[in-house]
Image (cartoon, rainbow, N blue to C red):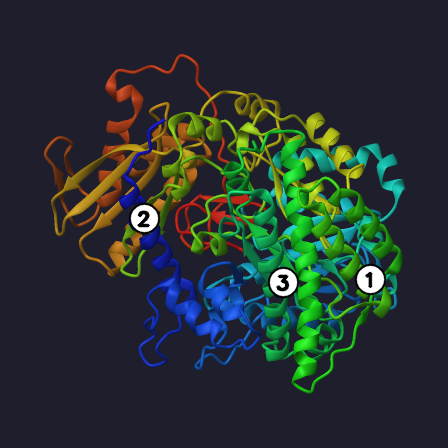
Amino acid sequence: MKLPISREDAIKEWDRFVNYLIKERYAVRNPKTGKPKEKDLRQVLKRISSEFSFPGIAKALQNGQFITATPFLMNGGNPYTQRKGYYSCYPLGNVEDSTEAIFDMERDLVTIFQHSGGGGIDVSHIRPKGARVDNGQGTASGPVSFAKGYSYLSARISQGGKRRGALMIQADYDIKDIKELITFKGEKPGVYTGCNVSVNVTDDKFWDDEELIQLIAEYIWKSGDPGLLFTQKSLDNTPVLRKHNPVFSNPCGEYLSTKDTACNLLTVNLTKCLHKDFSSYLANVYEYSRLAAAAGNEILDMGGFPPIERIKKNTLKFRPIGIGFTGLQHAMNHFEIAYTDEHEAPKFAKATQLALMLGSMQGSIDYAEFKESKGEKLEPRKWNMKYVNKIHKEAENFAGELPDNAIWEKHIERIFGAVKKMGGLYNSVTTSQAPTGSISQLLRVACTGVEPYFSIIQSRRVKDADGSWKEFTLVPLEFYEYDKNKLAWIEGQTAHNITPLQQIRILEACQTFNHTAVSKTINLPATTTVEDIKEMLFVARDSKLKGITMFRDSSMTGILSDSAAKSAEKPGTPFSDLPERYGSTFKFSGPASLYVTANKGEQDHVREVFINTTKSGSTIHGMCESLGRVISVALQHDYRLVGKIARTLEDISSDSVWTNTSLGRVFSIPAALAKVLDSCAPEANGKEDPDPYEEPSSYSSCPACGKLTLRRSGGCSQCISCGYTTC
């Protein structure tokens, strides 16, 4: 295949996109004007790197060898902010069963969102709907009613003024209201976008409830929710002692630990670890993970907690850090390993994760020694020794399969020897695998986290400060080093060309040497059935995974029916995924210039409308933009509404006349739109649709730009138009 632009132009596109992210999200702003004081990533990294004193951290950050999470990029070293939130996520544990506790949790979530974080809560303890309250004088509204309120709250409140809140709502599978919890998002798609929902599988009896598993599979098929959290695996497969109840999740499911602890995430850039030989690559992973762990510890000592005392106290008691990586498929490509290879790909992921785990554990030890050299002493956090012995043995067994295995065997014996001698380590956990999203894109990594490339070429549309839309064509820069055969080889390994089972194998390989969890949504093709999903739930049960989330392409239609299933089986790309959109723009003359653009999908059906006037910022401009958005939502849900919409608008009149040379004269902007819709419909061009189809959307509405372009990516939702993400 041929790449669409030159390497020089690809670099310029990445520069433009990254600088947009910096301007809109990460830059320190002038407190008087609100304008960004930083223009590029180099300036942001220079600011945050100056906050560290541990040897090697500043240089590694500036070289892009690892990167901190979004909150620290926003707020680290920012002299102006009064909300120094440094941490990504906060599992807050159970919402207790009282009105005071329920609304106290709301206030805590608002505080966390305002300090650039996201929250996770468990509603299992709230009494069920219909239970008697007030000494029998009333009835309870149930946990789902409050879950809906928390979802709205998350969607409304911004994280540090830069992005929306993020929230996980989990509950035990055997609560009385579990069916309502499973279905409330899917019954009203696009309404409760402020949360992810997961069911806690607390014991093996869950798997005997065929009716419940069927319902879960149906709603995963329909809307992508709920996920499952295997809490028994969480208790048994983590350094955190069982008595601290390490079963509570952050919004994306990669941090399963004790409640009221801040999730302190950092990401190693595997593309910077690459070397001609595999042994040197693993050595680099180890070293950059060591530095990242030291950086995570130093961030903990800087503070940056929201003003909730129990969170600060608990986080410093356990000192959790979560080192993950990004660019896994890029690294595999470097060593000619296919992401689809059932043996070599999981082995590569497992080796990478082992090097990362060992490096992060060594970084914990090194940071304690660094503190002691400064006259300060860190005390080890007690670890679950049953887990330590198990993971030690697994590491020893696997090390024999690595090149230079003697080196890795020495690392393993030294590090685990220190853990056993101390009864633990200076951090309760040191590894986690988050969905990295824009963090990876800042590093120009297109295969984010453990994800494969979603597509060979990625398009991004973002809304600029002046209200105009800009489009970016992002081509992974490494592709310019590959010949056409290798590009074709990679194209066969993009997201929807990889079986769900292979995705689970990759995750399980990473989970082996991960102290918390691996966040990745299993991407399913549109043709996946409910029975397929049920089968994968049981596969996940028998794997090492601590949880699973699945998203079927072309779900989110709002209707679980045979017609929807049949339409999902038809070939074709959802409109929002098309690399090109075909359309026409009509100019009308009148009191101002009016432009109406109608974009079509691959079957020549109108799916998107833009209406603009030259009166930017005016009320009429805002109404035109909103009318276009609303109609676009309707047409992407069902293109057949185009005629009904045109008939609804065509007879609206106003005190203005608008004229187009080919469409004639109309007496209102809505009537002008009706003319355009009629003109662009296939029938107007003498075309017939002998096999009418229903083209459901895989997307929900983006709260930032309003377009129907928000889709699940990993444990987050990301807008492919404006770049908004819940992570």
SS at badge 1: helix
Residues under numbered marks 1 and 2 in contact, where contact means CB atoms less than 8 Å apart: no
Foreground: 125 or 85?
Answer: 85
Of callouts 3 and 2, which one flags the residue occurring earlier in the amino acid sequence?
2
| Residue behind mark 3 | 290
Tell me which corner region of the image, top left, top right, bottom left or bottom right, holds residue 106: bottom right
Q: How far apart are the two marked residues, 3 and 2, measured between alpha carbons?
A: 30 Å
User: From the viewer's perspective, is the residue at label 1 or at label 2 nearer?
Assistant: 1
Query: What amino acid is found at the position of numbered circle 3 in the picture?
Result: Arg
Foreground: 65 or 431?
Answer: 65
Tell whether 690 sits left or right of 75.
Answer: left
Residue 17 image point, x, y percent? 35, 53
| Residue behind mark 1 | 417
Label 3: how many Cα within 10 Å (few below 14, some 14–19, many 20+):
many
Foreground: 445 or 610?
Answer: 445
* Above or below, comparing residue 546 to residue 567 in the picture: below
| Residue behind mark 2 | 11
User: From the viewer's perspective, is the residue at label 3 or at label 1 nearer?
Assistant: 1
